[in-house]
Amino acid sequence: MDLLQKAENQASMNNSSNIAVIGSGSWGTALAILLSRNGHKVNLWGHKKEHVDQLVIDRENKKYLPGFGFPGNLSPLNDLKKAVEDSDVVLMVVPSHAFREIFTKLCPFLPTKSYILSAVKGIENDTLATMTMVVEEVLSECKAESKTQEIGVLSGPSFAKEVALRMPTAVTIGFKRIEAAIDVQKIFVNEYFRVYASSDVIGIELCAALKNVIAIAAGVCEGLGYGLNTRAALITRGLAEMRRFGKTLNAEDVTFSGLSGIGDLILTCTGDLSRNRTVGIKLGKGQKIKQIVEEMSMVAEGIKTTKSVYDLAAKLAIEMPILEQVYKIIYQNKECSLAVRDLLSRELKVE
């Protein structure tokens, strides 16, 4: 028996929690498997009954994360009430554009006290709200006064497949009350999945959303045939834009230097498993966004987030030239080569 298996067996003997993972895509499935390996009772909810029925039959998510069998304490479900009732933690892993609708539906079934954790990297288009803001709004409308939920976020450089493969990974969990972050931190951590606690919820969420936009830009440059010099410059200046945006919204600057900031930015801009980088590469090679989206089986959050952040940056008068060019490529059909040219021809400045 190897050390990882011993650690997982030890975890199963420790105090276990009831966890609802809402979203059966690749990331939701990977987290559900991770938490099950840690000895927790996990309900994995999916919105399509036929997909969930297949999960039950196969005991594996062959569509989104093939090759990883479900532990016995992982239960696929299509019923939201059954999925979330009696849960200590409700982990939201659905696309940002569906987040509000799904959370509104499950809200009445939440137990009296629970942690609600978002692992979604996006900003809502219509309201320009982060996912924890959406949770706060929905809770204020639906919950009874006797219910108390604490709201947090999980983010960091983490591809679903590598987590399922037990490859060493480090992420950050943030709650406004640091003690809550520390409590939830213990649920996720094991020999290959390290978790850091933070109280900068808004900073983590902004990093998670913004890095996807920069990753699309990095992919565009790669698709155009540019090299490593270009990528390094883009990541560096992209981080500067992220910091500028975060400062305006009172995020902590140190968060942008951490796992959920520069860590996730580097991974998403360079990793072959990055959906957003892949979208950018295809754009750089001349494909149109409509065709790219139609061909994708999974969501690239950066596409919709580009519009959200563009609108919010305009509203707050934040200078974000990379974001502006990505927006024009996706939503105004600007030629990628012209977008890069316009970035490079901007007025010279002091760094």
Image: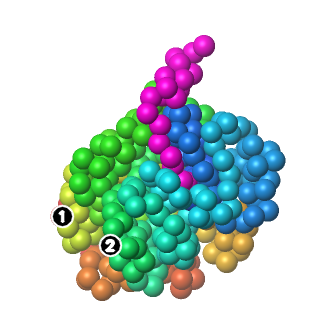
Provide the residue designation for mark 2: 145
Quadrant of res 95: bottom right
Q: Is residue 334 left or right of residue 343?
A: right
Near-viewer residue (18 or 275):
18
Q: Amino acid at mark 2?
A: Glu
Magenta stretch encompasses residue 279:
no
**Magenta residue span:** 1-21
Query: Horizontal and vertical percent for residue 175?
Result: 30, 55
Identify whether 227 is placed above or below 191: below
- State the residue at coordinates (49%, 53%): 87
Does dot 1 land on a helix, a strand or a loop? loop
Q: Is residue 169 above or below residue 245?
A: above
Toward the viewer: 178 or 97?
A: 178
Where residue 262 appears, x then y in whole percent?
35, 50
Viewer-nearest residue: 118 or 138: 138
- In this picture, residue 289 sits left or right of residue 262: right
The residue identified by callout 1 is: 350
Q: Amino acid at mark 1?
A: Val
Q: Residue 97 is drawn in which quadrant?
A: bottom right
Q: Position of residue 83 (x, y in %)?
A: 59, 58
